[in-house]
Image (cartoon, helix red, strand yellow):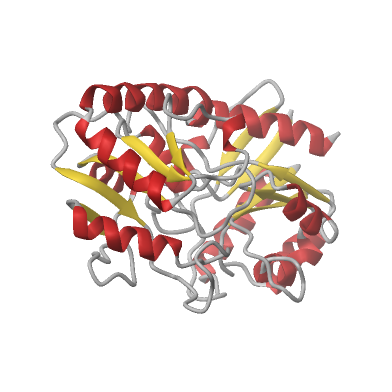
Amino acid sequence: MIKVLTTRPLYWDGLQTDKMIIKTVEIGNKLRNGTTMPEGIGTLMFNEGKQKLLIAFEEFKPDVFIFVTHFGLFTLEFLQQIKWKYSKTVFIHWSGNQVLDKVHNLCWYTYEMKSCIDVVLTNNKDPERIKLISSQIKKVFTLYDFGFDPLLFTAPQKEAEIECFFGGGNSVRLNKPKGTFPHSMLRRDILTKINKLYNLEVRGGGWAFGTFGKLHGLQYFKTIQRAKITLGINHLDLERYYTKRTFFFGASGRMYLVYYIPGMEKDFENHKNIVWYKTEQECFSFLKYYLINEGERETIAKNQREHFIKYHSWIPRLNDLNSIIERIVQ
């Protein structure tokens, strides 16, 4: 039995498959999905969190250690300390977005910590991106966000109150052409126009018409469900690149209208269990059509939620991890 130690998600603690048993060490504050991550400010982890993790290593003696972060919540020195003592343990960085540093072709955090990282888990299946990462890290696999509990994150319990919802910041690069990624002006321009035409709620920083309210977990999910249609526009155009927004919005029971993600036709059926658009004209055409045609919209939303429960709730995600861990250890 392969012993896996991880810092997230908390509800995986004690779970066991035919190949692995998981121990989750709680060393930080709650995240928006109710899970935890290491305590930290900048790149410094509090001593209490460090001690909890060290005790977990000593007691559990893991074969695999998964640490999850987008930012530098572990220092290189601290990871080196653990890696030196537990040299046979496989260290996995569940990295998420992997916005690459142009100089090093890795996200800055992975680059800084790469001497301690054996495996990277990322949230896309872009062959060029994976090739770049794997040129510096031994192994790279795709494992999407933790998934959700459909018994907790339920279908909408009441009628929608607004027409559209978007969650995310306005972090554009103003000198970039509209279709140039990452951080194109497409998100800003489309949402600005939608805000003038429809009843739109935006949660995120940098918007003149949005609210920078920090919503977490179920509160965020319930806020999504206030809208008839949820909107998605990624800053990255990586192949089959799906973030937490994808899974929360997809599971919400509200139709998800999203800017086309390369390769997503391999995972979804357009106008059946999701709706994607490739141009601004398509976006506004589909938005108008589905706001008017409630029956078709609700059928898509129902199919969409069923699809996300089947493939992206926490149980199938755990099975995905089980397969990856087996390959890594072998």
Residue at 23% across / 28% down in the picture? 293
Residue 136: x and y in percent read: 83, 61
Residue 28: x and y in percent read: 46, 59
Residue at 56% across / 50% down in the picture? 7
Residue 316: x and y in percent read: 56, 26
In the rendered image, which quarter contains the N terminus? top right
* Front residue of 70 and 162: 162
Where on the picture, by quarter, is residue 327?
top right
263 vs 146, left or right, is: right
58 vs 116, left or right, is: left
* Front residue of 253 and 217: 253
* Front residue of 229 and 149: 229
Residue 250: x and y in percent read: 40, 35
Residue 197 at least partly seen: yes
Say above or below: 141 vs 304. below
Residue at 38% across / 65% down in the picture? 188
